[in-house]
Image (tube, rainbow, N blue to C red):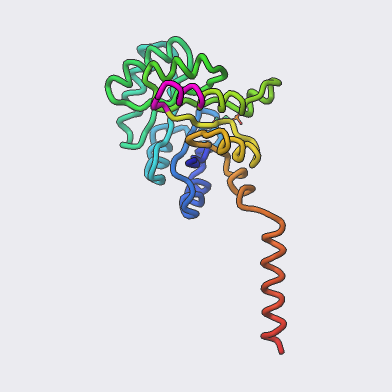
Amino acid sequence: MRIFLDTANVEQIKHGVRMGVVHGVTTNPTLTAKEGNADYEAVSKDICALVPGPVSIEVLVEGVEPMIKQARLIAGWASNAVVKVPATAEGLEATSTLAREGIKVNMTLCFSLNQAVLAALAGAAYISPFVGRMDDNGSDGMRLVEDIVTVYENYGFSTEVIAASIRHPQHCVAAAMAGAHIATIPYNVLIQMTQHPMTTIGISRFLADWQRLAGK
Ligand code: G3P
């Protein structure tokens, strides 16, 4: 499983890349707005320059033609730019055209297996089931990830599954066990993944024991 950071914060992305564990990034209008820079293109290009893998950048318009038009622009911002399009009928129409042009699409806001199957048929490079938001609504978000992985394998679809709307480290464990190709995670969850109290205690003990000897 690869890890993407679900953020538009440059410092967080740089740290993740320095650790050697962050391959790509997913953004959305909410995350980008949070960073307070209204120049969508500039922020997105900066992020694309930071990571080796794909950076998902969402369209900011509705309607098939406006989405296609904006997607083409976004795809031209960087060689690793991926366009995020909602998993709707209009989104499928746009995705189908874009995929035929060789533009990679991440179909976002996926909440059902049917949406995921349609995304694969339309030629989406990625599908993003929103695990945490499903859990918020009383459904089992990770069950959807498992089902998508199973059905994609059944039919040999090449669309990759991005477990999105991840809220805590246990979601990452479950995404890996479910066979998600990618988990896109907030920075705080990445940091939580690195932490274990026994590791912290172990380091303190090792250092204290050595210092006792060194102090003799
Ligand atoms: O990757 C999707 C993500 O940005 C949505 O997360 O926490 O707002 O549901 P959240």
Q: Could you say which is closer to the camera, residue 118 or residue 165?
A: 118
Residue ID at (36%, 33%): 81
Split into quadrants, the picture shows ligand 1 in the one at top right
Query: Seen in the image, is 77 located left or right of residue 168?
Result: left
Q: Position of residue 60 (x, y in %)?
A: 45, 21
137 shown above or below 28: above
Query: Over which residues does the magenta segment extend?
Result: 150-159
210 shown above or below 192: below
Query: Seen in the image, is 133 located left or right of residue 114?
Result: right
Residue, far front: 154
Residue ID at (52%, 38%): 7
Q: Position of residue 18 (x, y in %)?
A: 47, 54
Q: Could you say which is closer to the camera, residue 74 or residue 144?
A: 144
Query: Seen in the image, is 79 located left or right of residue 143?
Result: left
Q: Quadrant of residue 188?
A: top right
56 shown above or below 12: above
For the C terminus, give its image quadrant: bottom right
Residue, far left: 101
Q: Quadrant of residue 43?
A: top left
Q: Position of residue 185 (x, y in %)?
A: 56, 38
